[in-house]
C-alpha cells in the first residue's frame, strides 16, 4: 500500500498538478478532480472513473470492476457524466448538482468525486507509513520526498534490536519542490 501511494503521487498526482498549473496562463478556466470512489476489488485506481463518465454502470463487466453498486454509485455516475457534458459545452464542469470551483495556483481547489462529493484546498496526498533504515529523505525514481521526523519512532524487532524508524511520508506541498 505504501509503494502504491508513493507511485500514485509520482505517476499521477504531481504531474496532474504541474499540468494544471502550466495551463493556468493559457486557458480561461482550469479544473482539477480526484476520483476517490473505491471499488471492492481494486480500491480507488486509475481509470475507475470511466464507467462514471459515461454513466454506464449497468454495462456487462462493470460490476466486476466496481463491486456492488448502490444509490450513491448511480448518483455519482449521473453527476460525473453531467460534469463532462457541461465541460464539453461550456468549459466548466460545475452544474446544478455539482459544485466544482476553478483551479488556481494558490489554493489548488480540487473536486473530490466519491459517493459524497467535496472540494478540497491543496487536496492532500494520502499519508502512509513505511520502514526506513536511515533518516533524511526518501528518493523514489529520482524524486526526493520529505519525511516528517516528528512522527517517527523506533521500531523494535523480536530480539529488541532497532530495525529502523517508522515515519510518515508526505509529498511536498509544492510539487515543484517534491
Image (cartoon, rainbow, N blue to C red):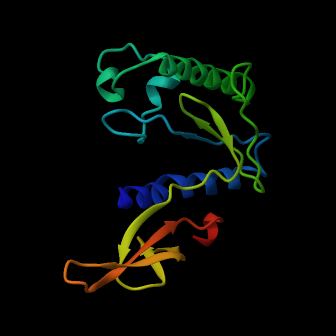
Image quadrant occupied by the C terminus: bottom right
The percent coordinates of residue 106 (x first, y second) are 78, 56
Residue at 44 percent of width and 18 percent of height: 70
Which residue is at the front of the view, 101 or 29? Answer: 101
The percent coordinates of residue 10 (x first, y second) are 47, 60
The percent coordinates of residue 94 (x first, y second) are 72, 27
Image quadrant occupied by the N terminus: bottom left
The relative height of residue 151 versus residue 21 in the rendered view (above or below) is: below
The percent coordinates of residue 115 (x first, y second) are 54, 28
Residue at 70 percent of width and 54 percent of height: 21
The relative height of residue 121 versus residue 28 in the rendered view (above or below) is: below
In the displayed structure image, the side of residue 29 where residue 6 appears, left or right: left
Residue at 62 percent of width and 72 percent of height: 177
Q: Looking at the image, which residue sits at the far top?
A: 58
Q: Looking at the image, which residue sits at the far left?
A: 159
The relative height of residue 19 versus residue 86 in the rendered view (above or below) is: below
Which residue is at the front of the view, 25 or 178? Answer: 178
Residue at 63 percent of width and 57 percent of height: 18
Amino acid at each position: 500500500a505504501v509503494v502504491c501511494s508513493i507511485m500514485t503521487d509520482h505517476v499521477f498526482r504531481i504531474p496532474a498538478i504541474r499540468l494544471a498549473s502550466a495551463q493556468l496562463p493559457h486557458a480561461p478556466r482550469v479544473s482539477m478532480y480526484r476520483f476517490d470512489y473505491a471499488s471492492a476489488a481494486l480500491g480507488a485506481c486509475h481509470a475507475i472513473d470511466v464507467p462514471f463518465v459515461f454513466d454506464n454502470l449497468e454495462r456487462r463487466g462493470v460490476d466486476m470492476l466496481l463491486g456492488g453498486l448502490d444509490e450513491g454509485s448511480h448518483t455519482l455516475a449521473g453527476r460525473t457524466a453531467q460534469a463532462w457534458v457541461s465541460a464539453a459545452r461550456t468549459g466548466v464542469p460545475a452544474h446544478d448538482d455539482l459544485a466544482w470551483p476553478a483551479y488556481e495556483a494558490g489554493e489548488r481547489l480540487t473536486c473530490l468525486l466519491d459517493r459524497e462529493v467535496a472540494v478540497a484546498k491543496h487536496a492532500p496526498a494520502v499519508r502512509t507509513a513505511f520502514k526506513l533504515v536511515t533518516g533524511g529523505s526518501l528518493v523514489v525514481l529520482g524524486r526526493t520526498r520529505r519525511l516528517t521526523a516528528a512522527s517517527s519512532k523506533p521500531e523494535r524487532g523480536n530480539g529488541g534490536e532497532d530495525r529502523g524508524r517508522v515515519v510518515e511520508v508526505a509529498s511536498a506541498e509544492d510539487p515543484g519542490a517534491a
